[in-house]
Amino acid sequence: GENVEQHPSTLSVQEGDSAVIKCTYSDSASNYFPWYKQELGKGPQLIIDIRSNVGEKKDQRIAVTLNKTAKHFSLHITETQPEDSAVYFCAAPFTGTASKLTFGTGTRLQVTL
Amino acid sequence: KAGVTQTPRYLIKTRGQQVTLSCSPISGHRSVSWYQQTPGQGLQFLFEYFSETQRNKGNFPGRFSGRQFSNSRSEMNVSTLELGDSALYLCASSPGTGLDQPQHFGDGTRLSIL
């Protein structure tokens, strides 16, 4: 069935270091891959997304890469700051199913001083 | 531009009661989707509405229902509440109903069942 695996579940980095979160998906027809950041008491915030016709997209300190052959995509955060601490979710749509988006299980990122 | 607005932010109910949650999408967005978020199951899709019609439905019992109004505002209703319905209920809006349409979430309604 539809599945999005996300790793790691927790990630601790020092301020200024880079953080990488990886996701794999099962439906080769999926063509849109968003990333969300969820802070305590808030809803998920869309921070970046990528479509299957590109391999990489960058927005300031965050970037997403996509490997359609291997069916995985990754979020890269450079020069991490304390305000980057949050739970990050990847997601993918699965064609032919009812679900609008299937989410990964989340990565809790902690940026320490 | 105002974001997605969900009301109320918090609700406490008892088993057997019913509850209605409200969602106002971003202006111009016509698709509204609802998700349930729990620590054990994560984010799970409930249903999507577009042009006042339910387009998709997730794997939830019939106690969970929804509707959309002509101004794209949406409500979801849960009847005969169970303890396991305690969760954060999130609404997301997007311009259209395509699978590649960016979805923007509200801050949710935290529902607690006693």
Image (spheres, helix red, strand yellow):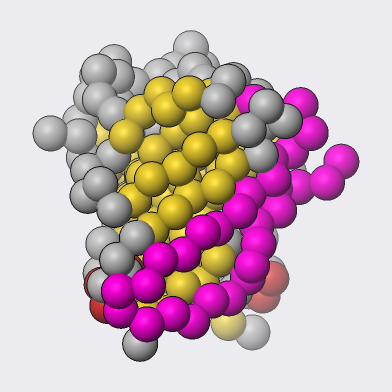
Count of marks placed on residues: 0
Q: Position of residue B107 (x, y in %)?
A: 62, 61
Query: What is the magenta range?
Result: B1-30
Say whether residue B102 is visible: no
Question: Quick one: quadrant of the C terminus of chain B?
Answer: bottom left
The residue that appears at 29% across and 66% down in the rendered structure is B80
Relative to B74, say whether B64 is above or below.
below
Say whether residue B48 is visible: yes
Image-based side of B113 in relation to A44, left or right: left
Relative to A80, say whether A50 is above or below.
above
The residue that appears at 25% across and 46% down in the rendered structure is B62
Question: Quick one: quadrant of the N terminus of chain B?
Answer: top right
Q: Position of residue A74 (x, y in %)?
A: 42, 42
Q: Is residue B71 magenta?
A: no
Q: Position of residue B9 (x, y in %)?
A: 63, 70
Q: B71 or A111: which is nearer to us?
A: B71
Q: A57 or B33: which is nearer to us?
A: B33
Q: Is residue B2 magenta?
A: yes
Image-based side of A40 in relation to B64, left or right: right
Image-based side of B61 in relation to B75, left or right: left
Residue most toward the right?
A: B1
Residue most toward the top?
A: A53
Q: B59 or B11: which is nearer to us?
A: B11
The residue that appears at 76% across and 26% down in the rendered structure is B28
